[in-house]
Image (tube, rainbow, N blue to C red):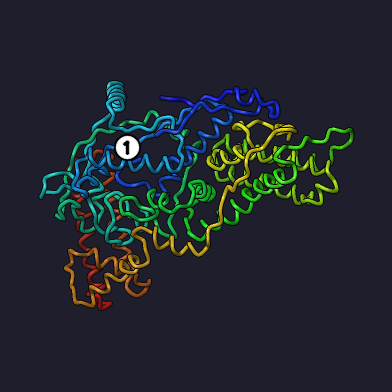
Amino acid sequence: MASAAATSSPASAAADTSVDAAVTIALDHQSRVVYVNNIPHLGNIIGCVLSADVYARYCRLRGYNTLFICGTDEYGTATETKALEENMTCQEICDKYHAHHKNTYDWFNIDFDYFGRTTTKEQTRITQDIFTKLDKNGKTEEQVVTQLYCEKHQSFLADRFVTGVCPRCSYDDARGDQCDACGNLLNAVELINPKCKLDGATPVIRDSTHIFLNLTDLQPVVESWVNKSSVEEYLQYENKKFSKSRGVGVFGNNVADSQIPSDVWRYYLLSNRPETGDSQFGWDAFLQANNSELLANLGNLVSRVMKFASSNYGGIVPAYPTKEGFAADIDRTFVERINELLAQYLETMDEAKSLRAGLRVAMDASSATNQFLQDNRLDNKLFEGSRERCDAVINLAVNACYLLSALVGPFLPVTAEGIVRQLGLPARRLTDTWSGRDVRGGHRLGKADYLFKIIDPKRAEELREKYSGSQSADAAAAAATAGAKAAKKGKKVAAAGIDKKAALLAEVPAGVGRTSELDALEAAVRARGEAVRRLKEAKAAKDEVAAAVALLNAAKEELTKAVAAALEGLGLQ
C-alpha cells in the first residue's frame, strides 16, 4: 500500500527563486484505481467516500501522515439478493459492481491510497483472526433469535429477503429491516402479510441460533467514540429518498454521462452536504451552484487576474513596491482578512466537524479577493495612471489565487490543478498563516484558461428527465394511481392481500378512512412486536416467547380485517 507523504522544497520549487519554497509541497501520491450490490448513487458518494477524500486531501496538504483506505463490502444478503435478481453467482455480481464502484470513484477523483475488496485472501485471513481472538477472549455469545422461515425453499430469511406491509405507515413494499416510506427501522416479524422475496411464499416464524459480539464491557468506550464522531444525515433526491436497491436517484454512471465536470458535482454535493439534517439534491440548485458560485466567484477571479496580468504585464508577476511608506492600509486590511478566513478554515477542517463550512470559508476567501480588486478599481486606467498601486494589487491577487488553490484543493482537485497550472507554480501546502508574499516579482505565469463554463439553466428539466432514475414523473404518477386503477377494474383483494389496500388507505385524509380504531390496532402491532423483541433479549422461556408471537399474529389479523373494512366503507373494495 502507498501512503501520502508530504515534503517541502521539491526540486522544481527550489530551482524557482520567484516562489517561496517553504510553502510548496510535493505529494508523493497518485490516484488508483460500500455494499457492492449496485452502482453507487450521489447519496452514497457524499455520505462516504467523497467526504473522506476531502479530509484525506486536506491532511496531505497540511503535511500530516495520511493513509486513505477503502474498498467494496462484498459479503452479506445484499450481494446474494442482487445475484438472484440478475441470475448471476455472487462472485460474478461482486466482480461486476466492484468495477462500477471503482470507475465511479475514479471519475469523481477519489484519491485512495488503496481501494480493495473484502473477498481477498488477506482480508479474509485478517477478519477470521479478529473473530477467533474475540471468541477466545469471551467477547462472543450465542442467542436465540426469532426469524421468518420460508417453508417453500426451506431457509431462514434475512431481512432483505422479506417484504410486506409496514405496521407503522401501511406502505405495501416495506423491507424486513426498514420501511422506505416512513423511514422506521423494523423487525421482519412485525411485517403485515410478509412474503418471501425469492418465491412469494408466506413465511412462518421460527427460532434460530446466532453468534453475537458482547460489547457490554466496551459500551462506555463505544459511546464516547460515537459522541465524538461526526454524525451525518441523508441526501435526498428532489424530496424523494435515494435507494440503491430500488434504483431511485442519480447514479455514478449518470453523472459521468452528463458531460458536466466532476468538480462541479463535487462542489454541489459538498456545499449541500447533509450534516445537521437531511439535505436535498435539486437540478435547478445544482446548475445555479455552477453558474452563480463557481463561475461567477472563483472562476471570474482567476480569469480576471490572469488576463489582466497577461495583457498588461506580459504574463510576468510585478514586484510588490518596496519604497518606504508605500504599503497601503487597504493591502494590510486585505492580508488580515485573508488570514482571519485561513484561521477559520484550518480550525473547521482540523476538527472535521463540517466540511461544508470549510468549503464555504474557502469561497469566502475568493469573494474577499474579488472585493479587493473592486475596491482598488482594477482596470486599464489604474495600470496607466497609478502603476505602483496596480503592481501591488496584481502581486497580492496572484498570491491570493495561489493560496486559494490550496484552500479549494481538498474539495475541487481538478480546479486546484488548473489554478496552479495557470500560475505556473507547484502545488501549495496549507500553512498556518499567509504573508501575501509567496510569489515574488519576476515569476512568469502560465497560459490563462477558463476554470468553469456556464451551463444553460434550461438544461435543468432535461437533466431531471434524463437522470431521475425510477423516480421520473411518469413512474411516480403510475405508482400513485396504481391502487385506484385496480379498484376501478373491479379487482378485489382478499383480507390476506392487505398490502395494496393499506397503500390506498395511507393516502386517505385523517378522519375519512384512517380511524382511531385503525391507529390503535397499528399501535398494538408495534407494541406486541416490541414485546417479542424484549423477551428474546431477556432470553425468556420458549413457551413465553411463543405466546407473545401468537399475540403479535393475532394483532396483525385484527389490523388486516380493520383495513379491509375501512376500504370497503370507502368504496375501494
Q: Can residue 275 be seen by looking at this rendering?
A: no
449 left or right, relative to 499: right
Badge 1 density bin: few <14, some 14–19, many ≥20, Cα 10 Å: some
Report x, y in % for residue 283.
48, 59
Q: Can residue 389 be seen by looking at this rendering?
A: yes
Q: Is residue 464 depicted above or below 396 in this figure?
A: below
Report x, y in % for residue 549.
20, 50
455 left or right, relative to 249: right
Viewer-closest of 357 and 325: 325
Viewer-closest of 530 and 455: 455
Viewer-closest of 270 and 458: 458
Report x, y in % for residue 315.
70, 40
Amino acid type at circle 1 is Asp
In the picture, the quarter occupied by the C terminus is: bottom left
Report x, y in % for residue 463.
43, 60
In the picture, the quarter occupied by the N terminus is: top left
540 left or right, relative to 66: left
At a point 66% along the width and 37% down the height, the residue shown is 445
Q: Which residue is mark 1?
A: 73
- What count of labels does the image hold? 1
Q: Is residue 74 depicted above or below 519 in this figure?
A: above
131 left or right, relative to 493: right
Which element is circle 1 on? loop
